[in-house]
Image: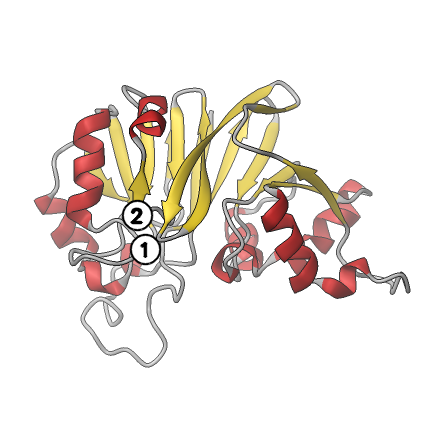
Amino acid sequence: MEVIILGSGTSQGIPVIGCNCNVCRSSDPKDKRLRTSVLIKSEGLNILIDAGPDFRQQMLREGIDKLDAIILTHEHRDHIGGLDDIRAFNYINRAPMSIYAEKRVLNAVEKEFSYAFSNSEYPGIPKFDFRTITEEVFYIENLRIEPIRVMHCNLPVLGFKFENLAFITDASYISEEELLKITNINVLIINALRKSKHISHFSLDEALEVINRCKPNQTLLTHISDRMGLNEEINNELPPFVSLAFDGQKIII
């Protein structure tokens, strides 16, 4: 299994428009962060988790010309805003794109992209094949995927476990039962917005607490804001098995 970090930034990305902080002005490529998304490559499948506003740019940067399905964690626009650009894959695949998400999230996608569901059949609109999921294990062909329920303030969000990898974004709370699903896995990718506390995202210390309890072999922190600090400086403060994810990073599991 290969995982590509397509984006590791929070909802505004880094640099933030109009911001002159040292992170937004950094020349280090690892401080340039598109909206959070990952690509899972396994068993001949390319599976995308979340398609935010930078989806097109991420696909072009990584040279992705094959996409089999998209899984959505939740309906916030920084996680679904790029779905119009699946049109390219509709053309390549000669088929609608399979979109896996909870019913609430699929309803939000239909509302956001209402023109794609119009009876007029306007040419060139994106084509979606909705696949409703719950908290139960599901499969994409032979790939087993286990949802992980987390809370994003008061909004239920899903993370996902693929064999020995787990991806969790936009979380501020994980129950004991759900923590068991990610205990002693190989790689954990989890959100850590900034050092200070936030109402709907784990802070750095809160993410480290989850890591200490679950004890993954390796952890990458994602959904990072400019308030976290410079990539190089923060990595020097972290335990050796924890690091900030960066855009374009590839992990083999």
Q: Quadrant of the C terminus?
A: top left
Q: Is residue 67 left or right of residue 114?
A: left
Q: In x, y percent, where is residue 189? A: 34, 37
Q: Amino acid at mark 1?
A: Ser
Which residue is at 33% across, 65% downward? 14
- Closer to the camera in the image, 189 or 198: 198
Q: Residue 209: horizontal and vertical position, in percent?
A: 17, 37
Residue farthest right in this picture:
120
Residue labelled with disc 2: 172
Image vertical order of residue 211 relative to residue 79, above or below:
above
Within 10 Å of disc 1 (Cα), the crowding (few <14, some 14-19, many 20+) is some
At label 2, which amino acid type do we have? Answer: Ser
As helix, strand or loop, the secondary structure at mark 1 comes to loop
Residue closer to the observer: 58 or 138 = 138
Q: Residue lying farthest front?
A: 154
| Mark 2–mark 1 CB contact (< 8 Å) | yes
Locate residue 138 relative to residue 193 in the image: left or right: right
Which residue occupies 30% across, 43% down?
A: 173
Which residue lies under the disc numbered 1? 200
Of residues 44 and 106, the one nearer the viewer is: 106
Query: Residue furthest toward the left?
Result: 237
Q: Position of residue 1 (x, y in %)?
A: 47, 24
**Residue 185 visible here:** yes
